[in-house]
Image: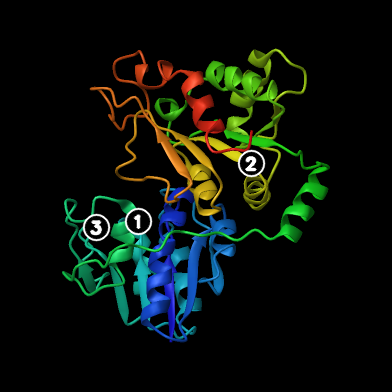
Amino acid sequence: MKALIVAPSWIGDTVLAQPLFVRLHERIPGLQLDALAARWVAPVLERMPEIARIVDSPFAHGELSLKARHRLARQLAHAGYGQAYVLPNSLKSALIPFFADIPERIGFIGETRYGLINRRHTLNKALLPQMCERFAQLAEAPGAPLPRPLPLPRLSSSSAERGGTLASLGLNLPAKLAVFCPGAEYGPAKRWPARHFATLANALADRGFAVWLLGSPKDRAIGDEIVSLSGSAGLPLNLCGATSLTQAIDLLAAASFVVCNDSGLMHVAAALDRPLIAVYGSSSPGFTPPLSRQARVISLALECSPCFKRECPLGHLDCLNKLDPQRVLAACLEGLPA
């Protein structure tokens, strides 16, 4: 039996889809599960044992490219897929399985995808409040209850992979390593202020921790600001934009603990089962929480949050500005050896 996953286009969402993959293997012995995925999320899927093969999806966010989708679909038509699980809710995400004549195309109705999706689920947000639950529901018959609890996402990072990444970056692993992920692709209303990260970095350095910053090239400026505000040359080490996602996975796996905004790397750190402090502002841990027993969510839970906006609609960003670094520091040190 072969099935195709049409993967989400966001790193965090891709991590949250892994419980679905586990359930599919539990239900279909001998399943070969492949994934059609954008190249920027493929490294996450490569660290999931449930995924056998990744098919490159070359399309940018929002790009339709009907002719190119049809060409890719005709290549996939000969792969023998019996099912396609279409995780995004957009119309265009359902086109390739349809063009590829995959017999059973499974997903939520989404953007009125009648015909494109032929095993259709209707979303009940009250019954499925979390994104991971919505993905996992696709393993069930439409309308059937979702068995709980869900398996937790788990990404692999071997000691050899971590060693290879450190060597390729010219880094030595400190005895005590804190990793910060100060970016958030969605927007500034999800980013804890740089000055708070700098204060936290200094407090941890005083306790013997090295601090490394991870993120995309877009986060480089935030990382530089944290370094500048910390007032210490070379502390923290700004690796934003200097690593691939594969390398970032291995560096997160090597951390003593991780401090993140609500971001894709937060979900990666959770799936690596690292001690994690997740800072929430405009978004809700009720919808996309870090799925790990080692994760601790910190939020002020103000009356105006979560607003789910990219920028603070009230202009003050109190949900993050007023979240004191000392509170995050206490969470970092809790449970660690003295």
Q: Is residue 321 above or below residue 51?
A: above
Helix, strand or loop for disc 1: helix
In percent of the image, x 42 and y 77: which residue is there? 25
Helix, strand or loop for disc 2: loop
Front label number (2 vs 3): 2
Q: CA distance from mark 2 to mark 3?
A: 41 Å
Label 3 Cα crowd, 10 Å radius (few <14 / some 14-19 / many 20+): some
Q: CA distance from mark 3 to mark 1?
A: 16 Å
Helix, strand or loop for disc 3: loop
Toward the front, the furthest residue is 338
Image quarter of the C terminus = top right
Q: Is residue 335 above or below residue 83?
A: above
Which of 187/157 is in front? 157
Mark 3 and mark 1 lie on one chain; the one further toward the N terminus is 3
Mark 2 and mark 3 lie on one chain; the one further toward the N terminus is 3
Label 2 Cα crowd, 10 Å radius (few <14 / some 14-19 / many 20+): some
Whether pointer 2 and pointer 3 mark residues with C-beta atoms closer than 8 Å, the reply is no
Q: Please name the amino acid that badge 3 sits on.
A: Gly
Q: Which residue is mark 2?
A: 256
Q: Please name the amino acid that badge 2 sits on.
A: Ser
Q: Is residue 253 above or below residue 320?
A: below
Question: Which numbered dot is residue 41?
Answer: none
Q: Position of residue 78 (x, y in %)?
A: 48, 85
Question: Which numbered dot is residue 132?
Answer: 1
Q: Is residue 48 left or right of residue 144?
A: right
Image quarter of the N terminus = bottom left
In percent of the image, x 70 and y 30: which residue is there? 209
Question: Which numbered dot is residue 110?
Answer: 3
Q: Position of residue 267 (x, y in %)?
A: 48, 47
